[in-house]
Image: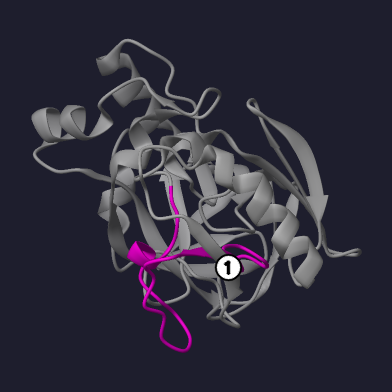
Amino acid sequence: MGWRLAHIFRHPIKAHGREELPVVPLTEGRCLPYDRHWAVAHEAAALLPGWNACMNFTRGAKTPTLQAIQCQFDEMTGQITLTHPDRPAIQFAPDDSAGQHAFLDWLRPLMVGGRAQPERLVSAGRGMTDSDFESVSILNMASNRVLGARLGRDLGLDRWRGNLWLDGLVPWEEFDLLGRNLQIGAAKLKIVERITRCRATMVDCATGKIDVNTLDALEQAYDHTDFGVYAVVTQSGAIRAGDPVEILP
């Protein structure tokens, strides 16, 4: 079959930066460790205990400039470093009150266009994925290349905010995996549903500015706005970039 895991990404603060990792331990029923562990609740948020829908948080679909944030999280020290082309780099501890205030002050100049302002950094004891279950998003390198060719540009990977990128599939073959189980490294995952996309995917993550209409391109070519699939981890184990990927019987 020749499929392999090409890239692993996580997003410690939902919609506020991403980082690539070489190896990750997956846990049954959980998303990637520290993926969407924190989120930025805005001033109009109506939060309930536990998981909350993305409408309660500041995000790239509403504020494109956020898409240009890059992130590095040190699990040993609990420190996050964020960079953005329009802001100085900042390092802070997201679980520390002083660190949270410093981060929110750093973030506010990026909130343009009259959007609800960031009010507090929150966590829920689980990953605040866009799905109401703890998911791992799986994307197809070939689908990205085909869509980029249709649009006449390299779309990159960051705009899709995915976790696991697979190589060796034909374009859109990921949609044929619904209900199937995959083995990646020592872990097993079940593919459960397609991912419907939003305006954040229209943003160039180098600049934080909209550069292409991915949603129209998907709709016109394929009659949907889906890209990638959600999976749940069914067997714990480590995965590494370069691991082979197999469909289980």
How far across and down, in percent of the image, does residue 120 sit? 58, 68
Q: Main secondary structure of the magenta part?
A: loop
| Magenta stretch in the rendered image | 32-59
Q: Is residue 112 left or right of residue 31?
A: left
State the residue at coordinates (32%, 15%). Answer: 149
Residue 18 visible from this viewpoint: no
Query: Which residue is the extreme one toward the top?
Result: 152
How far across and down, in percent of the image, does residue 110 sit? 54, 38
The residue closer to the viewer here, 162 or 57, is 57
Say which residue label 1 marks.
120
State the residue at coordinates (39%, 55%). Answer: 116
The residue closer to the viewer here, 158 or 106, is 106
Q: Is residue 224 left or right of residue 79?
A: left
How far across and down, in percent of the image, does residue 126 sit? 57, 79
Q: Is residue 79 left or right of residue 55?
A: right
The residue closer to the viewer here, 152 or 203, is 203
Query: Which residue is the extreme one toward the bottom?
Result: 49
Q: Amino acid at mark 1?
A: Arg
Residue 49 visible from this viewpoint: yes
